[in-house]
Every structure is written in C-alpha cells, then in structure tokens.
Image (cartoon, grey):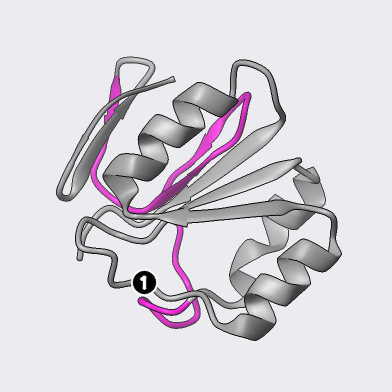
C-alpha cells in the first residue's frame, strides 16, 4: 500500500522513496527512468507489460506534466490492460483502492 505521497517523495509500506518508481502488487522497482522524462513510451513499460496487470495506473506527476501519446495508450489497451492516468496524488489513491481486488501496477512520476 502507498502510505503517503508529496512532491518528490513517496512512502510505500513504511519505506521512503525519492525517485520515480513502479509499484507492483508484490514489489517496488525504484529508479524508473523513461526514454523521455515527461513522455511515456512503450519501451518504458517493458516490465509492466510482462507482468500483465489488469490495470495500469500512471501517475503523471504532481502537476500532471507527463503525457501519454496516443500510440502508447493504444498499445497498452491492445494488451488488454485498462489504463488510468491521473496526477500522482490521485493515482496513489486509485492504486490503493484497486490493489485490494484487482491485479494493478502503478507507474509513478513523483515530481513535475
């Protein structure tokens, strides 16, 4: 569960993180770097697509600066994955709500 989030920092199961990350149901992958910082590409999602979640929650940043191009959105949905993109604070709440009953992964941009 995500305990708290604020600009540039997040606490998950009592552990604090200060860089973008991916939250799987059973682990956290720290230091999630993307091909382009504020644009989500298919290549950025390799680990997520391999995990085959039902839902991918993307935290687009504190102010929502990260964008998801139509081709990336289309690819995710073609894999049968529901995509939810929200500002990171809201994405954290959505992840916590969904993880109780669905296979969900969160890809979270912590700044901008």
Q: Secondary structure at mark 1?
A: loop
Give the residues drawn in magenta, as a range: 15-39
- Residue 85 horizontal/vertical position (percent): 48, 57
**In the depicted view, which residue is nearer to us: 86 or 27?**
86
Q: Quadrant of the C terminus?
A: bottom left
Q: Quadrant of the N terminus?
A: top left
**Other-residue count near label 1 (Cα within 10 Å), few / some / many at <14 / 14–19 / ≥20:** many
Q: Main secondary structure of the magenta part?
A: loop
Residue 16: say if magenta.
yes
Identify the residue shown where x is 73% and y is 65%. Answer: 76
- Residue 84 horizontal/vertical position (percent): 55, 52
52 with respect to 99 (left or right):
right
**In the depicted view, which residue is nearer to us: 89 or 45?**
89
Identify the residue shown where x is 43% and y is 45%. Answer: 30
Judging by the rendered image, the residue that carries numbered circle 1 is 66
Residue 41: say if magenta.
no
């Amino acid at each position: 569960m995500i305990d708290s989030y604020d600009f540039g920092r997040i606490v998950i199961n009592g552990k604090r993180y200060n860089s973008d990350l991916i939250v799987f149901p059973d682990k956290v992958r720290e230091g999630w770097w993307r091909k382009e910082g504020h644009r989500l590409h298919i290549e950025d999602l390799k680990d997520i697509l391999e995990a085959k979640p039902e839902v991918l929650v993307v935290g687009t940043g504190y102010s929502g600066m990260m964008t998801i191009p139509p081709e990336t959105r289309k690819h995710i949905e073609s894999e049968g994955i529901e995509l939810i993109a929200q500002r990171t604070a809201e994405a954290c709440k959505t992840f916590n709500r969904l993880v109780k009953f669905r296979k969900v992964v969160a890809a979270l941009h912590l700044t901008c």
